[in-house]
Amino acid sequence: RKEVEQDPGPFNVPEGATVAFNCTYSNSASQSFFWYRQDCRKEPKLLMSVYSSGNEDGRFTAQLNRASQYISLLIRDSKLSDSATYLCVVIRNTGGFKTIFGAGTRLFVKA
Amino acid sequence: EAGVVQSPRYKIIEKKQPVAFWCNPISGHNTLYWYRQNLGQGPELLIRYENEEAVDDSQLPKDRFSAERLKGVDSTLKIQPAELGDSAVYLCASSLAPNTEAFFGQGTRLTVV
């Protein structure tokens, strides 16, 4: 079992839909969490950090559930331009920091 | 402000040949990472530097891979000799600290034939 797991998808949704992704992590020493977006043949780019209190940036909302060890990303009113792979990133501190990426969830938004 | 700069963008080499990648991190970022990404996978860490010190190279295949970060700024990653299975995208990233968000370069797409 991988330390950070994501549903690979793909998620196929129509424009305007709301879509949610989950990411689970197994190490309780995980302390920092992020969502990155990666377009085809491009580098990953930071989408948003995930705070314990949750955070929102426009149509995007990220939440952290430490008890169940997962983070989530909600995209409202999906746009065609949201089509990408969304990578979950976890940083743990177990005698040193370690950054671990999930394999990503692919999203296709259709007209 | 300039982002992370990598070169070359693409490289095609024959197996058993050497290859080197270069990375210039964001100014002021002490932490530098080299990742390898295969198609359909997330980036996998090869090595992490804090300034000029390699603090995590547990995933680096040391028989053929080497890296350096002289003066704690630019870094190079070398493969010698390259194997067919080394074909991947090699990403460099940097961050202010090891527990903060990282910023990626455009990557080097390596094809070994």
Image (cartoon, coloured by chain):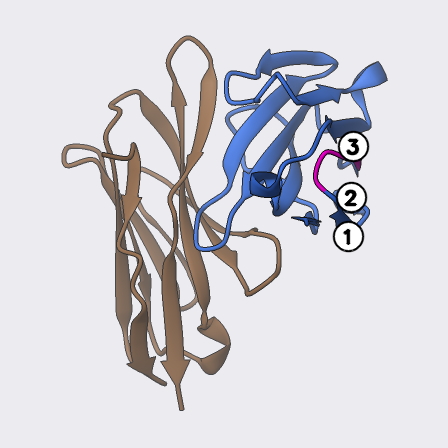
Chain colours: A brown, B blue
Of labels 2 and 3, the one closer to you = 3
What residue did someone put label 1 on? B9
Is the same chain shared between marks 1 and 2? yes
- In the image: residue B80, left or right of residue B96: right
Cα–Cα gap, marks 2 and 3: 18 Å
Secondary structure of the residue carrying tag 3 is loop
Which chain is indicated by disc 3? B
Which chain is indicated by disc 2? B
Q: Amino acid at mark 1?
A: Arg
Question: Which one is in front, A94 or B58?
Answer: B58
At a point 39% along the width and 79% down the height, the residue shown is A109
- In the image: residue A29, left or right of residue B10: left
- In the image: residue A91, left or right of residue B21: left
Of labels 1 and 2, the one closer to you = 1
At a point 57% along the width and 27% down the height, the residue shown is B46
At a point 76% along the width and 37% down the height, the residue shown is B26
Q: Is B88 contained in the magenta span?
A: no
What residue did someone put label 2 on? B6
The residue segment tinted magenta is B15-21
The percent position of residue A83, horizontal first and vertical second, equals 45, 72
- In the image: residue B9, left or right of residue A66: right
Q: Is residue A28 above or below residue A80?
A: above
Mark 3 or mark 1: name the one nearer the start of the chain.
1
The percent position of residue A95, horizontal first and vertical second, equals 41, 8
Q: Are discs 1 and 2 less than 8 Å apart at CB?
A: yes
Q: Amino acid at mark 3?
A: Pro
Q: Which mark is residue B18?
A: 3
Cα–Cα gap, marks 1 and 2: 7 Å
Of labels 3 and 1, the one closer to you = 3
Q: Quadrant of residue A111?
A: bottom left
Q: Is B17 contained in the magenta span?
A: yes
